[in-house]
Image (tube, grey):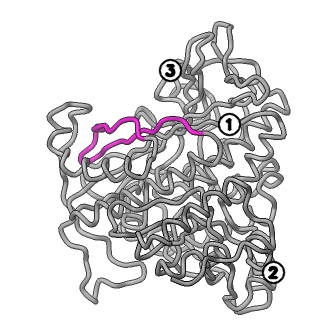
Amino acid sequence: MPPRASRSDTDFVSRHGLWNAAQERAAVEIERVLDKRELDVVRFSFPDQHGVLRGKTLVAAEAAHAMRNGVTMTTTLLAKDTSHRSVFPVFTAGGGFGMTEMEGGADFVMIADPSTFRVLPWAERTGWLLCDIYFSDGRPVPFSTRARCRDALASLGKAGFEFRAGLEVEFHLFKLENARLAPADATWPPQAPEVSLLTQGYQYLTESRYDMIAPALEVIRRGVEALDLPLRSIEIELGPSQVEFTFRPQSGLASADAMVLFRAATKQIARRHGYLASFMCRPALSNLMSCGWHLHQSLLDIRSNRNAFVGDGPEGLSRLGKSYLAGLLAHAGAAAAFTTPTVNGYKRYRPYSLAPDRAIWGRDNRGVMVRLIGRPGEAGTHLENRAGEPAANPYLYVAAQIYAGLDGIARRLDPGPSADTPYETSAAPLPKNLGEAIAALRGDACFRDGFGQAFVDYYAHIKEAELARFRAEQGEQADVTPWEQREYLDLF
């Protein structure tokens, strides 16, 4: 083994002050694991603009040095839409970003967050590290979605609060029949795999349906728990081959990190066992139902260490909680660009479908966009945003909630009364398609201020390129199209 990496100011991390004391301690522990030769390789990964993990795999002998000095990646990865095509002119002045650092496919540097280290239970002698991304001079890359989420959490912290979130994630789990690996299938994007069902569905939460799919679910459950993710339940959903995993609440960045790792782990484990897990909202297969990602959220008052949403009035939500809720509703149209970032996700916004179609809230009502859960004085009182799709980038989903909620608090907005008939109110409709959501995002001053104008323009450009390709091939259609199947089924 080469000598342990220097901890002097000669390494990239020390030179730019990128780790805190806890991360430094975690790095020392990782180096001890590497010194014992317990691993063969370590995967260094970062979540891209779509929440998809990209990275490189290093042999263990190089991992300690790379952890402190970084792994280089091409900036073109930040220019890609969901087809993995670059949609910025990267070989022109400024690379299409207006930044010399992005010209010509130049490099950026992945720096590991040692606190995220895992040994992957499904991959032999393989470690894994989630990374943040920097330019060669130590400046954070402004298009890092994990960094944008960290900024939102910092803004919330300055206001005196900590974000708490629990995950409720639906997805489809299929038997893989044909991976479509013939050369003729290697189009760009590739032809979607052919799959069959594991259950016929329509027996919501029945034990018999669970037992039918249990062998497939168990290999995923064991892997997820071995990663120390806070798994709470595994459930059979209503639709064919549709399941749901729920996770206990976590603070700060942890819930978004957990979602990224859960999705990647589930897809990789499933594929190794002959299954295909898809977080695409509504696959183009007969009789399937849409999947959602419900984000349960509350704020912890840092000074009192109490849930800031708890209220003693008849609604059971504090004044601050009501304003936060009102902020979610006020910015729902623009936030849809982050909570529902695919063409496909808008096929889910239908009335009388257990999914929202307008920006409304209600007490324990599954037809609204935001559901209030908790009785007056109950410590676990929280809000459940039901607008999201499981393909959403979790860092942008979380950050959008925080900025919208903070705006509601700052302006002391009122959410209005609870909706008992959510599909029959005059509340503002949610966007009908991705184009409407992107237009709303471009015009939302709160998000342009929170995320930064450059990031909003960058993100909108990528999604508009995705949308333009869809419209050129398919046009707007109510039914799920072959384009969506190729674009999303295996990617997410």
Residue 196 on the magenta segment: no
Give how far apart the Cα atoms at labels 1 and 3 are.
Answer: 17 Å
Quadrant where the C terminus is found in the figure: bottom left
* Labels 1 and 3: the sequence-earlier one: 1
* Region in magenta: 231-250
* Labels 1 and 2: the sequence-earlier one: 2
Horizontal relation, residue 156 to residue 145: left or right: right
Give how far apart the Cα atoms at labels 1 and 2 are.
Answer: 33 Å
Disc assigned to residue 99: 2
Neighbours of disc 3 within 10 Å: few (<14), some (14-19), many (20+) = some
* Labels 3 and 2: the sequence-earlier one: 2
Q: Amino acid at mark 3?
A: Asp
Tag 2's secondary structure? loop
Looking at the image, which residue is at 50% across and 81% down? Answer: 61
Q: Amino acid at mark 2?
A: Met
Looking at the image, which residue is at 47% across and 44% down? Answer: 293
Q: Amino acid at mark 1?
A: Leu
Kindly identify which residue carries mark 1: 328
Disc assigned to residue 119: none
Disc assigned to residue 364: 3
Image quadrant where residue 196 sits: bottom left
Image quadrant where residue 12 sits: bottom right
Tell me if label 1 and label 2 are in contact, CB under 8 Å: no
